[in-house]
Image: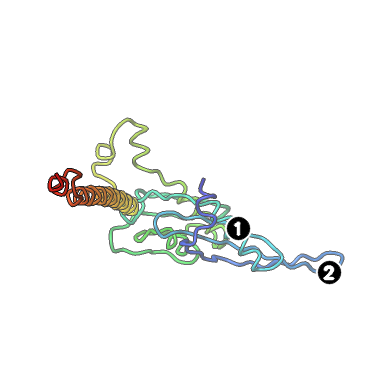
Amino acid sequence: MARSRYETAEELEERVVRVDRTRKTVKGGRISSARVVCAVGDGRGNVGVGVGKARDVPSAIEKGMKAARGNMMRVPLDGYTIPHTVQGKVGGAVILLKPASRGTGIIAGGAVRQIVEVSGIRDILTKSLGSGNVFNRAMACFQALQNIYDPQVVADRRETTVQELIGRQIVDPYEQEDLAAAKAAEEAEAEEAVEFEQALLGEDEAGEEAGAQEGAEAPDDDGPGESSEE
């Protein structure tokens, strides 16, 4: 579903996180290739990370972007931060993500910062606890984002409400904006439909009035001309 929705989207922000060049020695000489880690996001809670491999860098970037768009996911948000602390581990890299208060900003660097920025998260604390391999860090960050639980889903699973579960309400500002925009669009369509109907009714009434006036102005067959002849 995400693949068909985001594969051709033009509003996505694309980032090249890392480019690794490799050389392989074979009997006929050396073969050069490239591996690229890419991140894409709409800045509104949707993000994806992908890896592309090819003989040249442009082809690897194109493959990486396509793979990232195919891996798009929705990040559960609590305001402009994440709802709880989460950790991701790939290889020797371990990335820790923690919620932050409003105005903290993105406390991250390198690959983690680029992925978080395109996701739309504005306030977060991060820490790298393992290897410094950029590829594994990027994948560990994406895995951590995938491990975030949606409080509403957890509350539904426990047959309770978010208010009873954590003692407060959680609002995703991007979802609220989308709902408000959809509601405004529906209201605009309804207003246009009403105006169109009123315009049609106005044309019908004008036609009836014109017909009535023509009928009133037409002379009668039994007019004064016939009586004078008698």
Q: Amino acid at mark 2?
A: Gly
Image position of 39 (left or right of 62): left
Q: Position of residue 64 (x, y in %)?
A: 60, 60
- Give SS at disc 2: strand
- Gap in Å between the C-alphas at discs 1 and 2? 26 Å
Q: Is any atom of residue 146 visible in this view?
A: yes
Q: Amino acid at mark 1?
A: Val
Q: Are marks 1 and 2 in contact (CB under 8 Å)?
A: no
Q: Position of residue 78 (x, y in %)?
A: 32, 51
Label 1 packing within 10 angstroms: few (<14), some (14-19), many (20+): many
Image position of 74 (left or right of 152): right
Image position of 214 (left or right of 63): left
Q: Earlier in the sequence, mark 1 or mark 2?
A: 2
Q: Which residue sits at x=37%, y=54%? A: 98
Q: Is any atom of residue 78 visible in this view?
A: no
Residue with the mark numbered 2: 29
Q: Which residue sits at x=58%, y=53%? A: 91
- Give SS at disc 1: strand
Q: Which residue sits at x=51%, y=64%? A: 14
Quadrant occupied by the C terminus: top left
| Res. 157 image quadrant | top left
Q: Nearer the viewer, residue 52 or 185?
A: 185
Residue with the mark numbered 1: 51
| Res. 17 image quadrant | bottom right
